[in-house]
Amino acid sequence: MFEINSLSIGALLAFIISYVSYKVKFLTIGGSVGTFIIGAIIFGLGGIIWSVPLLSFFISSSLLTTINPHKNFEVNDYLPKNRSRNFYQVMANGTIPTLIVILNLIWDKPFFIYLYISSIAAVCADTWGTEIGTWNKTATYNILTMKKTNQGESGGISIIGTIGSLSGALIVTVSSLIYIDLKFDYLLFVIISGVAGSLVDSILGASIQVQYLCPKCGKTVDQKKHCNAEIIYYKSGIRIINNDIVNLVAGASGSIFFFIFYLTFNTL
């Protein structure tokens, strides 16, 4: 059972992280608010064991975004101009892990920590795959048709991007070993679940995620604003399924994949 003292410490730690992240432009003001909410809950209710995977994802992904060499200028047309994470992006990545922490508090079961790590591994794999996969020009293919696509478009995958996804899942999983004794099969399940969750993100991005056609440059983008103008030309996908919704589903998919492994092998 959590204590008021742990909640206070969690809230203080969340405030420090969100404030510093805003100051160094990892986050927008809204993003810092979202980080504080999620951080206060996870740090306060989960303690250090549940905090480490989240911190490894947040810090590593923020640094990757910041140090992106921007050598591949063509990709910038498909990525948001402001790379600082906003409220919706933070909530998309953090909502599922937060719900799992709360569920674990209500119904204490050993597999919840693995569902939690798998969810974070999935969003980290997705973030790392995007960042590393777009650093330099490389052949990119639509995950559904396997036809060449523009680098940076939703649903595109590449060899280097897939390696990036695997690296993202690995860093979250390995960081968890500091406080959790993961057996080898658990380790593999979490990593595979994380990478699988990032692939779900790409599949949704190539199928049902909303896409817009910029009237000025003619590019297909998933942002409503492009070329310094609001886009009114809807091209494909489902209007309410934006990138934030896709990221949310990807995080949930990581947990679902691990749960399938749990039901199949029943090793926990």
Image (cartoon, rainbow, N blue to C red):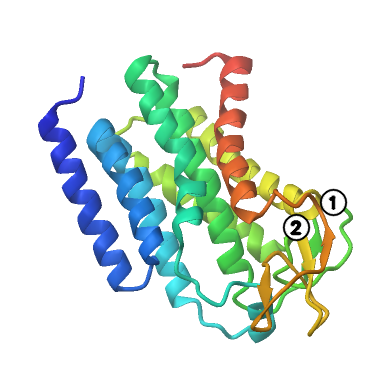
First of labels 1, 2 by sequence position: 1
* Relative to 142, 174 lies left or right: left
Callout count: 2
Residue 155 in view: yes
* Relative to 61, 74 lies left or right: right
Who is closer to the viewer here, 140 or 26?
A: 26
Query: What is the spatial separation of the Cα atoms under label 1 and label 2, in whole angstroms?
Result: 8 Å
Image height of 176 relative to 170, above or below: above
- On residue 258, the disc is none
Who is closer to the viewer here, 197 or 160?
A: 197
Measuring from the top left, give residue 107's x and y in whole percent.
38, 14
Amino acid bearing label 2: Gly
Q: Residue at x 55, y 41 (%)?
A: 251
Q: Which residue is disc 2 drawn over?
A: 155
Q: Which residue is disc 1 drawn over?
A: 144
Measuring from the top left, give residue 120's x and y in whole percent.
47, 43
The crowd level at tag 2 (other Cα within 10 Å; few <14, some 14-19, many 20+) is: many
The answer to the question of whether label 1 and label 2 lie on touching residues, with beta carbons closer than 8 A, is yes
Image height of 52 relative to 16, above or below: above
Q: Quadrant of residue 182?
A: top left
The crowd level at tag 1 (other Cα within 10 Å; few <14, some 14-19, many 20+) is: some
Q: Residue at x 44, y 76 (%)?
A: 67
Amino acid bearing label 1: Leu
* Relative to 12, 176 lies left or right: right
